[in-house]
Amino acid sequence: MAENAKRILILGLGGAGCSTIARIASTAPDGMEFAVMDCDVQTLERCAHIETRLVIGKGITDGLSAGGDLETGRRCAESSVSQIETLLSAVDLLLVVTGLGGGLGSGAAPVLARMARNAGAHSLFFTVLPFPFEGSVVQGKAHNSLHRLRTHADAIVQMPNKRIQPDGDALLTDSMERSDRTLSAGVVGLWRILSHTGLCNLDFADLHTLLRYCDATCRFSCASATGEGRAQTLIDALRVHPLADNGAIFENAPGMLVGITGGEDLTLAEAQQIMESIVPDNETCWVKMGIAIDPSFSGRISAMVLTAESWKEPLVGDGRGGLKSASGEGGQGELPGVLKPRSRAFGGSERTVWRGEDLDVPTYLRRKTKLPR
Ligand SMILES: Nc1nc2c(ncn2[C@@H]2O[C@H](COP(=O)(O)OP(=O)(O)OP(=O)(O)O)[C@@H](O)[C@H]2O)c(=O)[nH]1
Ligand SMILES: [Mg+2]
């Protein structure tokens, strides 16, 4: 890893998350770093090929699942704070895959997001939402968890299981597998565009900008294509992706990252055709593009597009080639990295400093916590 490379940890949380990560890890490109976490020992046993497996809440469920109880899931995570802190140390970006609607994933995800923020890591959650037939109680738990997650996570990608429309009499396991494959492709695609140095780089700072300004929810689309007319095939596939709403996610996006990967045979015309079809024809969409040449892609091109669903507020140029929010105010997403020490906080009274922290500064500012929307 290059000296200034950012560390990306890909974590599976709960049953659905662990099964997706187990699938990704068995065919992953070199260099991806994985971990799985559950209170259910049996789930972790199915992930034997993943080096880092964390059993949380041992004293609470005794190695069993959280039994669909969100509060138990939350307590499992809270009881394993030091294990999780160790896992998150020196991580720059945490990509979490989890299913919401059960107990462990729904309860532990918000705790994990909070801990990632406190550890100074960005977090992006790829969440699977339950099928409607699982009932309103399960849907309610997923909704509740999403609501809490928005408080601390930088961004959340929602992937309702129902988006993967099974053909006629497809087996339930097959449609779940399709859902897992869709998520896996998104996780690998995002990792690839952040990890490959390319002709035209997309890097961590670009993702940071998207996460800082997006209003918590993101979508993605990704596809690969080969053969004659492969650029058009790729564009069509990006539009019919289960999360792309026939291209509406591109047309309406206020911001997007586009990563294109191809072999030595990738042409300028192909890159241009893809960009012109994906990027909305307006001046308000913030777009960052990266192109990477990977010799193993000979004959194949692939693209990953991560879009913000909405922006906290419109962005304008800062006159130095950067961006700032239109109001000119920081907003919660732009909390200062280092709080400036002040000699007298309130009208000449002495600062209240405890263990090196200035208690006159509100806790949410000191801890860089996003308040609930
Ligand atoms: N796509 C997909 N979705 C799944 C899978 N397993 C479960 N789900 C979905 O994810 C939701 C949460 O289920 P789990 O991940 O098994 O629950 P958990 O977080 O382990 O919670 P507990 O088992 O109660 O501790 C379910 O309601 C399903 O909609 C899977 O293998 N693939
Ligand atoms: Mg489970």
Image (cartoon, rainbow, N blue to C red):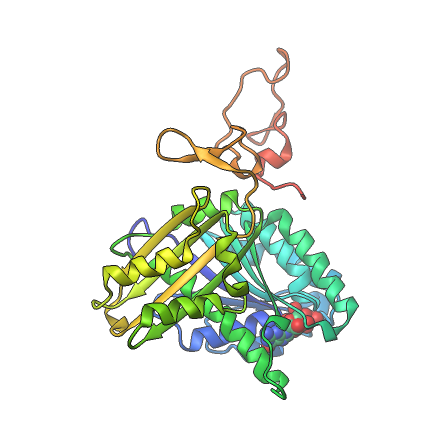
The image quadrant of residue 282 is top left
In the displayed structure, does residue 354 sit left or right of residue 328?
right
Task: Specify the quadrant that holds the C terminus.
Answer: top right
Is residue 168 depicted above or below 196 in this figure? below
Tell me which residue sits at (57%, 41%) in the image. Answer: 312
> Where is residue 317 drawn, in percent x and y?
42, 33
The image quadrant of residue 232 is bottom left
| Residue that sits furthest to the top in the current view | 348
Is residue 322 depicted above or below 88 in this figure? above
The image quadrant of residue 41 is bottom right
Task: Specify the quadrant that holds the N terminus.
Answer: bottom left
Is residue 87 depicted above or below 295 in this figure? above
> Where is residue 158 drawn, in percent x and y?
59, 61
Tell me which residue sits at (35%, 34%) in the image. Answer: 321
Asked whether 338 or 317 is in front, the reply is: 317
Tell me which residue sits at (56%, 45%) in the image. Answer: 118
> Where is residue 306 drawn, in percent x and y?
46, 57
> Where is residue 22 drawn, in percent x and y?
50, 75
Please indicate, yes or no, whether residue 117 appears anywhere in the rendered image. Answer: yes
